Amino acid sequence: VLSLFFLFQIPFSCCGTMVHRGFWGIKILLFLVGIVGSLFIPNSVFNDHGYAWAARFVSAFYLIFQVILLIGFAYDWNDQWVARADRNIGTIAETGWLGAVLLCSAVIYAFAIAGM
């Protein structure tokens, strides 16, 4: 089954870059058709039978993924600014980078407490 899957992927990998970078007219048209078409979906699709339960479970995974991405971003950002401070040991730039880390942390905490 896996070999059939990869054989099926060969044509897509050969022309994937061309389709990704080109055909903007067709992509925009399909996007607009999808938006207008979604207006005609009946309300019964979004009831408690299928879509709502799937959205509940998928949203939990989405939120966990977003938290992981935000934590990774925060660690990378902190590592870069502390590394810049370490390169400038004994200068005013060291104090500036470390002060910027503390200031950004304080602002983010203030926004979190304020509920923004």
Image (cartoon, helix red, strand yellow):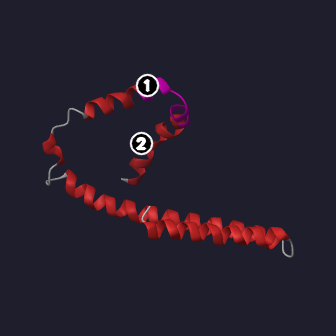
Q: Which of 46 and 114 is in front in this view?
A: 114
Q: Where is residue 26 in the image (x, y as percent from the top left)?
A: 43, 25
Name the element at disc 1. Answer: helix
Could you tell whether 104 is left or right of 43 in the image?
A: right
Q: Distance between the residues labelled 2 and 1?
A: 23 Å
Is 104 inside the magenta-drawn segment? no
Q: How crowded is mark 1: few (under 14 residues within 10 Å), some or many (20 or more)?
A: few
Q: Which of 22 and 7 is in front in this view?
A: 22
* Type of the residue with mark 2: Phe
Could you tell whether 30 is left or right of 46 in the image?
A: right
Of the numbered discs in the image, which one, if any, rests on residue 26?
Answer: 1
Could you tell whether 105 is left or right of 112 in the image?
A: right
Circles 2 and 1 in contact, beta carbons < 8 Å: no
Q: Is the magenta stretch mostly helix, strand or loop?
A: helix
Compared with 81, 5 (above or below) is above
Which residue is labeled 2 in the image?
Answer: 8
Which quarter of the rendered picture does the C terminus lie within? bottom left
Q: Where is residue 112 in the image (x, y as percent from the top left)?
A: 47, 68
Residue 33, by quadrant, is top left
**Residue at position x 13%, y 44% from top?**
44
* Type of the residue with mark 1: Ile
**Residue at position x 64%, y 69% from top?**
103
Residue 8, by quadrant, is top left
Could you tell whether 67 is left or right of 49 in the image?
A: right
Q: Give the range drawn in magenta.
A: 17-28
Residue 106, by quadrant, is bottom right
Of the numbered discs in the image, which one, if any, rests on residue 16?
Answer: none
Q: Position of residue 43 (x, y in %)?
A: 15, 42
Q: Residues within 10 Å of mark 2 (few under 14, many from 20)?
A: few
